[in-house]
Image (tube, rainbow, N blue to C red):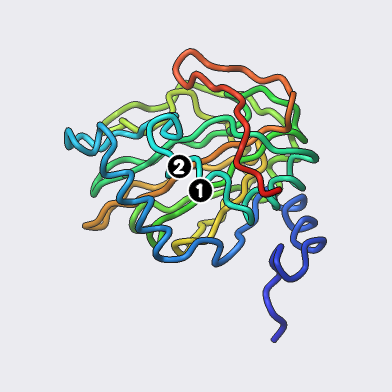
Amino acid sequence: MSAPITFATNPDAAYAQFLEDGFFIEPDVLTAAECDQIIAAAERLPTARDGTYTPMMNVHKLDETFVDIMSHPTIVGIMRRLVNGTPCGLHTQMFFTPPQRAGLGVHQDNYFVEAKADAFASAWVPLVDVTTENGGLYAYPASHKDGPLPVAVADTTGDKRQTIYEETVVPAHWEKRDISIKRGSVLFLHGYNVHGSYQNTSQNKRYVILNTYIREGEAFRPGSTAKREQFPLKLAS
């Protein structure tokens, strides 16, 4: 049985797979100790301290731990290829996703950012093992090839504190793929990949940090809520 393709072992094949599917999982990027360090930083954030555990945006402005992980050399090295140039930080968001919390509605990240298709990508970093049970992602392979898709108002019935209120209209013939991913691995997402997440039906929080990157100097939409700002990473010399 052949070894799995990774950016570490076969970057050209890994990049080709990313271009085909619109997403790619790179295994074993962070250590367990690094994951625990980020979880500890997350538990110091305001919505953890007040017990609401609502997602927090721009956490890199609150704790240097999040800048460090965004600047992780393996992640930045892969991002350099995905955004076709020098990657800059754009936005961070910490998801705690406690038990029974709803997931995110189906969406395309670049619907909100409005960057060039080849200049923007996301890194979704689970700090615990993530499966369908505890709020795992699902994605539509190759959906990015259709570019920006129309949206419709989402069903906001029930606990939708993490749900996007305008969801992507998914063609009926598309088939989604559930994604299970080990802690410390990184899911790289094309800006136009269509994806969402499930409700957490487990008894534990699903800690994930989402980092988004843009090619240096490219235009984007800041957003009235997200307040995106391009910022330099701690790149190795």
Q: Residue at x 26, y 40 (%)?
A: 44
Q: Nearer the viewer, residue 127 or 104?
A: 127
Q: Going by the image, does 12 lie left or right of 209?
A: right
- The reply to whether residue 131 is in sight is no
In the rendered image, the residue lying farthest to the left is 50
Label of residue 26 in the image: none
Residue 154 x, y percent position in the rendering: 43, 26
In the rendered image, the residue lying farthest to the top is 224
Q: CA distance from mark 2 to mark 1?
A: 5 Å
Count of residue discs: 2
Mark 2 neighbour density, 10 Å: few (under 14) some (14–19) many (20 or more)? many
User: Is 174 above or below relative to 157?
Assistant: below
Q: State yes or no: discs 2 and 1 in contact (Cβ < 8 Å).
A: yes
The local secondary structure at tag 1 comes to: helix
Q: Residue at x 77, y 56 (%)?
A: 15
Instruction: Provide the residue designation for mark 1.
Output: 69
User: Is 195 above or below relative to 217?
Assistant: below
Instruction: Provide the residue designation for mark 2.
Output: 66
Type of amino acid under label 2: Phe
Q: Going by the image, does 140 lie left or right of 85?
A: left
The local secondary structure at tag 2 comes to: helix
Residue 24 x, y percent position in the rendering: 65, 56
Q: Nearer the viewer, residue 230 or 95?
A: 230
Type of amino acid under label 1: Ile
Q: Give the position of the N terminus as an image quadrant.
A: bottom right
Q: Quadrant of residue 126?
A: bottom left
Residue 54 x, y percent position in the rendering: 29, 33
Q: Residue at x 49, y 42 (%)?
A: 210
User: Is 203 above or below relative to 214?
Assistant: below
Q: Nearer the viewer, residue 229 or 183?
A: 229
Q: Residue at x 58, y 30 (%)?
A: 90
- The reply to whether residue 67 is in sight is yes
